[in-house]
Amino acid sequence: MTMAERRAVVADLGEPPYRAVQLSRHFFGRFTEQADEMSDLPRASRDMLADALLPRLLTAERELSCDAGTTRKTLWRAFDGALVESVLMRYPDRVTMCVSSQAGCGMGCPFCATGQAGLTRNLSTGEIVAQVVAGAHLLAAGLVPGVAPRGRLGRASPRADIARISNVVFMGMGEPLANYASVLAAVRRLTDPVPEGLGISQRSVTVSTVGLVPAMARLAGEGLSVTLAVSLHAPDDELRDTLVPVNQRWKVDQVLAAAWDYAATTGRRVSIEYALIRDVNDQPWRADLLGSLLAGRLAHVNLIPLNPTPGSKWTASRPATQREFVRRLATAGVPVTVRDTRGREIDGACGQLAASARR
Ligand code: SAH
Ligand code: SF4
């Protein structure tokens, strides 16, 4: 809800509308939904207001951590039993929260654990925001250790201090642009200033899409400056039709045209996601073709070493092949980075934990 909507609900409950601001400060500023922690609210109305406005939407079913506690994955159970995942990744200079926008996904990409299970349902705005608030709560409670930047002695020292969520990426389960209204409202709540929302910078929010062209155009018109990531995975339609089945509807040239329109409208560099799959999409000629499509554009390539899903016939590219792919893109003048592969041992890739819980 917007603040105006929260005020109206509080008024309907017979309480002064400013209680909506108090509740919002607890949730978006102190990351709590627990009535007994809201000592500025009269005892008589605390429980009633918290029940009405801050019902518990997600319950942690499993928590896994690795990378000395700096990567933390949570499997959530929603009110109806739907399972979704979120991942918190703490770095010396930032904390990124990776959230799910749907339980499952209907897009059917064959290399993706979420895609293999199909779509259960869309998440609500509240269920999306709750994943980020839960991460913020862990950080504020000092429960996520940090790693200080390397000092003069070159040693990284663990830090258990408090931090805030600086980045949110819609790269968990689901296709965010297939759940457009809820995702857009979630982006607004995440980026509205406290107490209206969480106060995260729009530029630090990334919406990743498989390439739903009409929705990409709509997002460009929202007046937001969020980063758009496009999961391309192949520069040619023949291969992309199989890796990303929705390509049969919107082709590579249409998806990229929508990406360049987004960049032109927002001034934001588009991130092109490319999961490197051994002997499938990692050939030198595909690197050159990708380079020629992206050269001179406001774009950046994020190569993702494939994280094989259980039973998959595919695996990540050989290191030398990956290096050559990077070299060819760089030669074409295209900015390129290889994504770090945190969380492999905790079923880090999209949908893997939920899949293992169902098994
Ligand atoms: N549905 C959206 C966002 C969620 S997926 C999308 O597809 O963009 C987030 C990213 O993880 C996408 O780029 C997706 O292609 C990638 N991904 C999915 N499964 C993967 C795997 N097994 N290994 C590496 N990347 C994967
Ligand atoms: Fe859905 Fe993205 Fe997985 Fe494709 S890669 S199935 S769009 S979550």
Image (cartoon, rainbow, N blue to C red):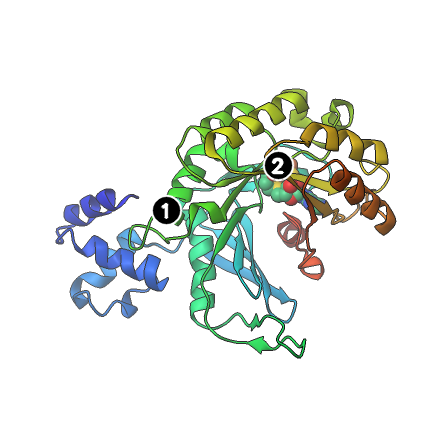
Disc 2 designates what residue?
299
Dot in front, 1 or 2: 2
The percent coordinates of residue 266 (x first, y second) are 47, 34
In the visual, does 50 lie left or right of 205? left
In the visual, does 359 lie left or right of 49? right
Figure quadrant of residue 66: bottom right
In the visual, does 10 lie left or right of 357? left
Q: Which mark is residue 126?
A: none
Q: Closer to the camera, 78 or 305?
A: 305
- Which residue does the image show at 84% across and 31% down from the upper left? 285
Q: Closer to the camera, 271 or 114?
A: 271
In the visual, does 195 lie left or right of 351? left
Amino acid of disc 2: Ala
Marked residue nearer the N-terminal end (1 or 2): 1
- Which residue does the image show at 68% across and 31% down from the upper left? 294
Secondary structure of residue under mark 1: helix
One can see residue 33 in this view? no
Disc 1 designates what residue?
189
Q: Crowding at label 2, few (<14), some or many (≥20) Cα neighbours within 10 Å?
A: many
Q: Closer to the camera, 7 or 12?
A: 7
Amino acid of disc 1: Arg
Q: Closer to the camera, 84 or 177?
A: 177
Name the quarter where the N terminus is drawn: top left
Q: Crowding at label 1, few (<14), some or many (≥20) Cα neighbours within 10 Å?
A: many
The answer for how far apart the CA atoms under marks 1 and 2 are is 27 Å
